[in-house]
Amino acid sequence: MNVPEVFDAISDKLQETASGKSKYTWCKYLKDTINYIGVSIPDINRIVKDSFQSVKPEGSGLKELVLMFMRAPIAEYKYAGITIMKNYFHEFFTDNEILGFIEGFYGNEYVYDWSTNDWIAERILTQIIDRRDEEALKQILSWRDSENIWKARASLAGFPGAADISSHMEDIFSTSEILIKKDERFLKTAVGWVMRELTAYAPDRVKDFLRRNSIYLTGEVITNAIKYLDKKDQKEIKKELKKISGKL
């Protein structure tokens, strides 16, 4: 079975499994920023796994297959491509080669919604971060300067799920200092979510970050960033930030 045939086989199974009710729910949740056909994540995982039991492309064939899914304007197809990358790319490619391949998604505008972008971050970038290759980490962090908002968001979005997030604290704070000053909502929310995780290790440093950048914060960022603080600390920092900047 050649690569287009593998794509067609997986595509057929995705279409057969699709649910109109699930499609409506996801399209509404994502505010129609990307089309869904209504296939659950567990079903996508199962379909990919079952399909690869009978045939598994290797090397360039894997890249070709993933690109076919990433080009499709359907969320579940993109998720299938990302799942293939997560499960099989490390057998054939270095972390830097995988990152270079992902950069093409942004350059070709295959990623244009937060859901697909964060799936890449959670399923692939977090894996790479946990393998702790210094050159790969530098490459991810360099994305913070990108004019593509999704690529810039990805520079931070893989860290919340990292196995040892506290060991990446300096990189996270330096990247957050850059992204929080941007006007784009999805760059700011990436900061809020990673700060939320860091409150378990350095709550005072997170609060200092919020104070220092108070003029750049939104209510959404503040709410996310302090979510895991105790109620007393939440109340105090909210009051302080409101006094400084008028937020909340």
Image (spheres, grey):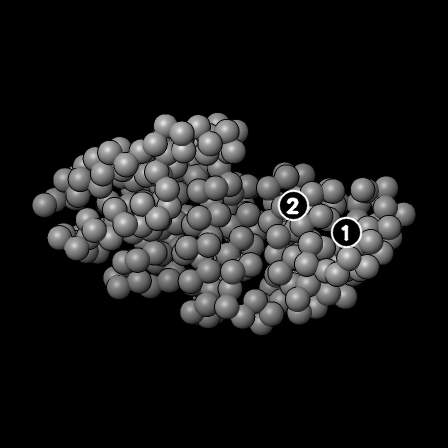
Query: Horizontally, is 8 left or right of 234 in the view?
Result: left
x 65%, y 63%: residue: 198
Q: Secondary structure at mark 2?
A: helix
Using the image as rendered, state which of residue 42 and residue 1 is in the foreground.
42
The amino acid sitting under disc 2 is: Lys
**Circle 1 — which element?**
loop
Residue 173 quadrant: bottom right
Residue at the spot of label 1: 213
Image coordinates for residue 13, horizontal then vertical, percent: 22, 38
178 left or right, relative to 67: right
Label 2 sits on residue: 188
| Residue drawn where x is 86% and y is 42% of the image | 246
State how far apart marks 2 and 1 are (Cα): 11 Å
Crowd tier of the residue under label 1, counting other residues whose Cα lies within 10 Å: few below 14, some 14–19, many 20 or above: some
Is 173 on the left-hand or right-hand side of 65? Answer: right
Q: Earlier in the sequence, mark 2 or mark 1?
A: 2
**Which residue lies at the image location 50% right of the left edge and 68% below the top edge?**
163
